[in-house]
Image (cartoon, coloured by chain):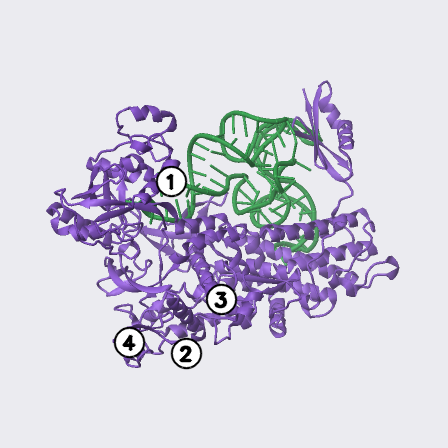
Amino acid sequence: MDEKYFAKKIEDKWQTIWRETGAFEVEIDDARPKFYQLEMLPYPSGNLHMGHVRNYSVGDALAWYKRLKGFNVLHPIGWDSFGQPAEDAAIKRKVNPRDWTESNINHMRGQLQRLGLSYDWRREMAAHRPEYYKFDQWFFLKMYEMDLAYKKKTQVNWCETDQAVLSNEQASGGLCWRCGNPVTKRDLEQWFLKTTAYADQLLDDMAEIEAGWAEKVLKRQRDWIGRSEGAFVDFSVRTASGSDLLNKEIESVNDDVKPSATADGSDKIRVFTTRIDTIYGANAIVVAAEHSIVDANFEHFSDEAKASIAKIKADKLKVTDHEAEIEKEGVDTGLKAINPFSQEEIPVWVGNYVMIEYGTGAVMSVPAHDERDFEFAHKYGLPIRQVISEPHLAHEHHTMQVLALEQAFTEYGVLVHSDYWNLKTSDDAKKEMTHYAEMHGFGEGATTYRLRDWGISRQRFWGAPIPIVYCEHCGIVPEKFENLPIELPDKMEITGKGESPLAKVAEFVNTVCPNCGEPAKRETDTMDTFVDSCWYYFRYLDNQNSELPFAPELAAYWTPVDQYIGGDDHAVMHLIYTRFWTKVMRDIGLVKFDEPVKRLLTQGMVVGETFFDEIPNPDEPDGKGKRIYFPPSSVTVERDAKGKILAAKSVDGKTLKTAIERMSKSKGNGVDPDEMVEIYGADAARIFILFAAPVENELVWNESGIEGAVRFLQRVWRFVHKWQVRLSEPFAVADGLSRNSDVSQNKIQPPANAGSTDARKLRQKTHQTIKRIEENFEFLQFNTPVAALMELSNALYDFKVEPETASDADVLAIREAVEALILMLAPFAPHTAEELFAQLVGNEQGIQANGGRFPEFREELAKADEIEIPVQINGKLRSRVLASPDATNDELQAMALADAKVVEHTSGKQIVKIIVVPKRLVNIVVK
RNA sequence: GCGGACGUGGCGGAACUGGUAGACGCGCAGGUCUCAGAAGCCUGUGGGAGCAAUCUCGUGAUGGUUCGAUUCCAUUCGUCCGCACCA
């Protein structure tokens, strides 16, 4: 056995053994419970970063733990390999995105393997390979059949100079990332998936996963879906003259918007409100500039109104960063609407704060009870009338003149100045008024969502082509399933300018209609990469299947995912889309459950110090400058005694600003995982990253701590080495102790009272540690079990017995502790654990092959001979007494009162009360 | 603006359902070994007082509930995150 711990050597050795023996390859096994451990797959950018290392170290720890617990653990990995960076690389460096992606994957696979992560590599998938995206297309066609995929016009970010569509990131700040010119919006026909069809299920099924998902993630999803219950109310509309009703059928410009015309064909504006109880306070109808009623009557508007509406529309085309609140603007159209409850005539305004996308694109303005309406009414001098009162003031308000409020009162209350509904509560009024509207045919209860259908069209090359053909005779024709995959061409030109790159590839575009066989053209848009990540973890189950995305019977065994781990930046989009996808797969019949992920752990970011110079940018209204980053290695940093940065200077003496930001190459604060592995070893790097902070927290990278992880591993290593000879010798049969060969089966079961007090204490520590670590894993804590292992290791060093003189009972206690330590170390430092275990059992087959299991907790061994009971006087700790763990409350009280220090503190005082917490504490209250 | 989370040593962080605050690690200080250094090992390490036993203050701040509060409640300050006119 090597005396010294050389990380590199044992890591190479065990990575080879794992690969050659297929140590982590799994198949269906009905004899064991399954566990599907999943981590979010990486984008193959070229290099692993520390965030990946953290994510995968956590996942690997759990996978190891579950294997040691006897589960059949599926632990796969793959590549989210479609996306913008490959295309950017193609534009900048004239490389083929496929070659660039494949070579990145090869490099990063090596990095993952050097970390010693326990993946079943046979199951690897990559989104950009035709055998995978064939099924993106398959799903698209299924959804098209199910009426879940459709095409409609929508706005995109558009750069006039480059004639190109931009993603939100590429258009950030309202400027094009390539040419720096202002970005505009443009209408484009795009493909959508009907996520809204599942809005209620996405909300309601959260009940099934509540226990396993962080509340903050569910909350964000709930907000994203944004269900609100209310009512539609129809207001009849008159022209400015107040006489003749308009006869035109009014239709919305937007598919999301419910038609404004009611069944009888007369002209109405339909509004959505969650506060129908406030309707007597409506002073106007405010509609979005894009509302159909505006178009229908535009010619009758005043010049001022026309100009104002045009301006509002134009302002909406500007790309804003959501930073400042937009000043409310609006104009009276001259149209009049009739409040169906009060028969009052109120004006119809256009307002920039009403969104055409939400509800009906029209609202009733109730300034007394809505802050936005209040602001609007205030600006334009519209009347503000209170119709909801605080309950205790209701009678008074009811008999008084209509009040003008100083600010909006948005709470529920009691109705006033509302005719028949006066003095009813908001809750009752909402129900009754909705019912009344339904009875009289001018409204109905309604639910609206903020969730929009998912636009999946991308005018890009590096994505799955949408399998649609446009035929002059047949129109929009879906490809036939047997023609899949529709493959990306090998030759293309990607410039970042103009329309989708696929449109320029004639061999791709020109095809025949799957329906009539006549020449036709292909759709040249590709799918959003979030499509790939919707179902990738089902493909791991069956990555060779060419008929189906995966076989349902494999999914029936392995899925749903038991534990999913990733960054919380995916709390909404990816995790909503994949939940949606699962529900579609259920409706197709591929799976039999509603929710794909039972437990979700969102891990915090890995961040580091950054140094930068800020160059003022006059174009930015808030004075935010452009940052030029300097790599930390090039910066001279002055720190105070506490380590706080006092000053940072660049090589040329420039004073730099500092911040703590997400690690990234461009900011120069990244840490290369390969370098960490090279210097400290994969095990130490993994232990450190788990130990340094709780998983959910942000982790500020600070290299000094990693040495502690190395020291810990070396301490364990040295201890095992020092004791190896004694630990491997067979125990005397006369002692009733088990033999060496039983070690891996956890069969060491000597009598609990054997050995010295110290030996018993060590065994207590061992079993207490087992319990603690088990609990930590169940609660997904990874920093505390590492601490517990360190404590156990410290306890071994505190056990002052030398190998030469140790009794069999001592050796046994040590052996038990060492074996438990090694096995429990495996999830955190698998190479070291494997090597030490091999040395202990005397073969090279590894923990799993030797039947290594998580050590068994034994209550009777964890129990201490005596426990220390703190004694408080008036709540202050004054003394401690040693007692048997079985001592009764009366005994504890007697011992406490007999204690010398207690006597000292209580003498001359009157004992008022004595509180005894069983096995815990005694508190004596004196006066 | 609305919503949410969180404030514990020099630092990262422990602390079961209210019951010995500061586990574990980093850092720092002293010692040991050595020709010297590295590594290792040992000791100490929240503040204040004391030679010491020990006393006292202490979990952002102020109050409250309780025999007892880092933990529960109220107010307040601060930090971070999410949403962004969703009617």
Q: Earlier in the sequence, mark 4 or mark 3?
A: 4
Q: Amino acid at mark 3?
A: Gly
Q: In green, which chain?
A: B
Chain A, hue in figure:
purple
Mark 3 chain: A
Residue that badge 1 annotates: A431
Q: Nearer the viewer, residue A447 or A766?
A: A447
Which of labels 1 and 4 is toward the front? 1
Q: Amino acid at mark 1?
A: Lys
Residue that badge 4 annotates: A521
Q: Earlier in the sequence, mark 2 or mark 1?
A: 1
Contact between marks 1 and 4 (CB within 8 A): the answer is no
User: What separation in Å lies between label 4 and label 3 (alpha carbons)?
Assistant: 32 Å
Which mark is drawn over residue A570? none
Residue that badge 2 annotates: A482
Q: Amino acid at mark 4?
A: Lys
Q: Amino acid at mark 2?
A: Glu
Which residue shows up at 29% across the image and 38% down it? A279
Which of labels 3 and 1 is toward the front? 1
Which of labels 4 and 3 is toward the front? 3
Dot 1: within a 10 Å radius of its alpha carbon, few (fewer than 14), some, or many (20 or more) residues? some
User: What separation in Å lies between label 4 and label 2 (alpha carbons)?
Assistant: 18 Å
Q: Earlier in the sequence, mark 1 or mark 4?
A: 1
Residue that badge 3 annotates: A589
Q: Is residue A793 left or right of residue A377?
A: right
